[in-house]
Image (tube, rainbow, N blue to C red):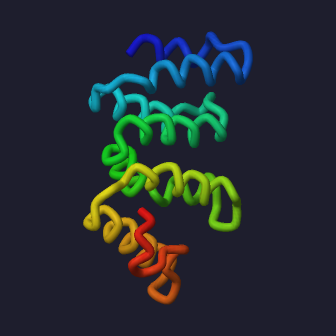
Amino acid sequence: MKTLKMLETYPRSMQEYSLILSSLCKTKKPRQQLYILRYSRHCDNMPRSLKKRTVCYVAKRNPTLAWSFFKQHYNYYFALYGEAQFSFGGLLECVTAGLTTQQQYNDVRDLLCKKLGRDRRGGLEEGSGEH
């Protein structure tokens, strides 16, 4: 996607960067969405806040893909935003908001229990109905 390469040099402001990125993320093609997620993860020029926003933009269109990508790169996002920071909780919330099945809920719960420790449930209560 040539437009993404343009992001490395073109934007003159955060607003411009965000506008271009949000437009790109409106694609419904999973292959392009994955490319955008990978680009945001590897781009050194992209501000941290836009890396989070990119995952959230894709999650609105394709929650399953965004969750899968987030899960695969959990350690990267955790290192970037940290457990105690509000940003990580917001990222986790936007990535999981569109998940709708019990299996997906179980997957989120299992990952958080594994990553945060068996004694902590990462804010997920059994049977809460929130995904």
Left or right of residue 73, residue 102 in this image = left
**Viewer-side residue, 2 vs 127:** 127
Does 111 appear above or below 74?
Answer: below
Relative image position of residue 37 (x, y in whole percent): 43, 36
**Quadrant position of the C terminus in the picture:** bottom left
Relative image position of residue 32 (x, y in whole percent): 33, 26
Residue at (36, 31) in percent of width and height: 33
Left or right of residue 68, residue 89 in this image = right
Residue at (73, 18) in percent of width and height: 13
Left or right of residue 127, residue 86 in this image = right
**Quadrant position of the N terminus in the picture:** top left
| Circle count | 0
Does 109 appear above or below 72?
Answer: below
Relative image position of residue 128 (x, y in whole percent): 44, 75
Relative image position of residue 51 (x, y in whole percent): 57, 38
Please identify the residue farthest to the bottom as the structure is shown: 119
Residue at (70, 60) in percent of width and height: 85
